[in-house]
Amino acid sequence: MTLKPPQHLADLNVAERKAKVEAMGYPGFRAKQVSTHYFSHLNDDPNSWSDIPADLRQSLADALTPKLIELVRSITCDNGMTRKDLWKLHDGTLVESVLMKYPDRVTVCISSQAGCGMACPFCATGQGGLKRNLSAGEITEQIVAAARACAKGNLPGGPTRLSNIVFMGMGEPLANYNPVIQTLRNITLPNPDGLGISARSVTVSTVGLVNGVEKLEQEGIPVTLAVSLHTPDDELRDTLVPINQRFNVREILAAADSYEKTTGRRYSIEYALIRDINDQSWRADLLGKLLKNRNAHVNLIPLNPTPGSKWTASRPEDEREFVRVLESYGVPVTVRDTRGREIEGACGQLAASEAANS
């Protein structure tokens, strides 16, 4: 049986953090002091927590901010603007996150599970299977590490602020529901209880867990929903995204529409273009018909190669035709920049191996 990760303040709500400190025999306000260092100052060195008596610092740090993730390796591309971090968890499990700096924003792509159980055949993570769920602490630590890297000026151009978080790394976020929701609260609660980043700057992706989308709709955290659709027809989607056999295209789009109605947030449709598999103009036509009256935006992702895969990216002329057909229906569409492809840090490539990238 896997040992659970040590409990971290990021696993707890504000009241639970206070209760934990009081159970240690310390006044409850110490919890807020530690949260301030962690979320507001991004400071993980208890020796510098000067507002806390020196003899209490280490015991509070051990109880509230135990080390959950350890950096094994960082590799970069795009002149340092894209960085993939490999993290080792307390039990030796490996996960990856990707930090990307753009002219107008800095985005971290984080993992919510080690591996993924959704088994999509064109995705390296899905091919590796699910190893385990991550705790809210383990997910939050990836985000705080990224925020710290930004603040310290570890990316080209000097110190900056982490602005966007996408749950598009390893795992299906809605299959690890409670830790992901706790992480969303850690992101969106104002300092010092959380990072104070707007829900509008957060994207949660799903392959289409309708029950999870319906629950998320009721949480009152209006993040952007991204649906990994990849094809508009059930026949192909049953193979490309096997969960479709349980929740079909019509059902997932209905859930996304309901989410949009409740939150007021336009959702995105993620679509990896795979040569001669899902990039035909008739499929673009079908997708256009499905989406023309919906408040949705299509992100077309040129397929990123994964080791041993028989599939490859679409021909440029087929990609252009796909875009043209969608636009003819008035559907907003963007061809995504495939950041991190050469370090296997792009969409569908994360496999968390300790073997150095060649």
Image: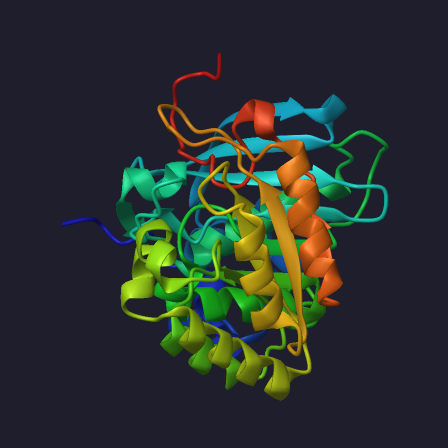
Residue positioned most to the top: 358
Residue 119 appears left or right of 322? left
What colouring method underlies this structural image?
Answer: rainbow
User: Which residue occupies the foreground of this view, 18 or 167?
Assistant: 167
The location of residue 19, given as percent across then percent down, is: 44, 77
Q: Is residue 271 above or below residue 32?
A: above
Residue 41 appears left or right of 315? right
Q: Can residue 339 be spotted in the picture? A: no
Q: How many marks?
A: 0
Q: Can residue 39 be spotted in the picture? A: yes
Q: Residue at horizontal 47%, vertical 38%?
A: 276
Q: Is residue 233 above or below residue 230?
A: below
User: Which residue occupies the foreground of this view, 211 or 17?
Assistant: 211
Q: Residue at horizontal 60%, vertical 32%?
A: 315
Where, by quadrant of the figure, is residue 267 drawn? bottom right
Q: Is residue 262 above or below residue 224?
A: below
The location of residue 277, given as percent across then percent down, is: 44, 42
User: Which residue occupies the foreground of this view, 203 or 39?
Assistant: 203
Residue positioned most to the left: 1
User: Which residue occupies the foreground of this view, 20 or 206?
Assistant: 206
The location of residue 57, given as percent across then percent down, is: 54, 52
The location of residue 68, given as percent across then percent down, is: 42, 46
Q: Residue at horizontal 58%, vertical 50%?
A: 281
